[in-house]
Image (tube, rainbow, N blue to C red):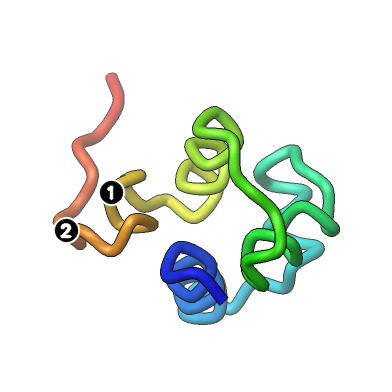
């Protein structure tokens, strides 16, 4: 499992989301999330941003970076 996949799964579970719920929120397929979490598929930065938005975390947090709060959108 890639570190990105580990972080994605960890954050998803912290938010009490199923793979299906996250997929619906992010507009991606369930299989895409499973593949990223298991490290069996490369990723697309646009889709990763969609996942970060759906999880309400900065994209950097998926990379294992900062967990600082995200600035509000206005």
Q: Quadrant of residue 70?
A: top left
Element carrying mark 1: helix
Q: Is residue 34 above or below residue 6?
A: above
Element carrying mark 2: loop
Q: Which residue is under mark 1? A: 60
Q: Quadrant of residue 64?
A: bottom left
Instruction: Identify the residue at image location x=63%, y=48%.
Output: 42
Task: Decide which of 29, 70 is in the foreground and name it.
Answer: 29
Q: How far is the residue under mark 2 from the one under mark 1? A: 6 Å
Q: In which quarter of the image is residue 4?
A: bottom left
Q: Is residue 68 left or right of residue 27?
A: left
Q: In this view, does 55 lie to the left or right of 16?
A: left
Do the residues bearing badges 2 and 1 touch, measured as CB atoms within 8 Å? yes
Q: Extreme top residue here?
A: 74
Q: In this view, does 60 lie above or below 44?
A: below
Instruction: Identify the residue at image location x=57%, y=76%.
Output: 1
Q: Which residue is under mark 2? A: 66
Task: State how many labels appear.
Answer: 2
Nearest to N terminus: mark 2 or mark 1: 1
Percent position (x, y) of residue 51?
56, 47
Q: For the C terminus, which image quadrant? A: top left
């Amino acid at each position: 499992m890639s570190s990105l996949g580990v972080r994605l799964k960890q954050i998803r579970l912290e938010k009490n989301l199923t793979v299906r719920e996250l997929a619906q929120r992010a507009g991606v397929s369930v299989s895409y999330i499973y593949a990223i979490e298991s490290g069996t598929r490369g990723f697309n930065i646009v889709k990763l941003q969609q996942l970060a938005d759906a999880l309400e975390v900065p994209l950097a947090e998926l990379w294992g970076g900062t967990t600082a709060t995200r600035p509000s959108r206005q």
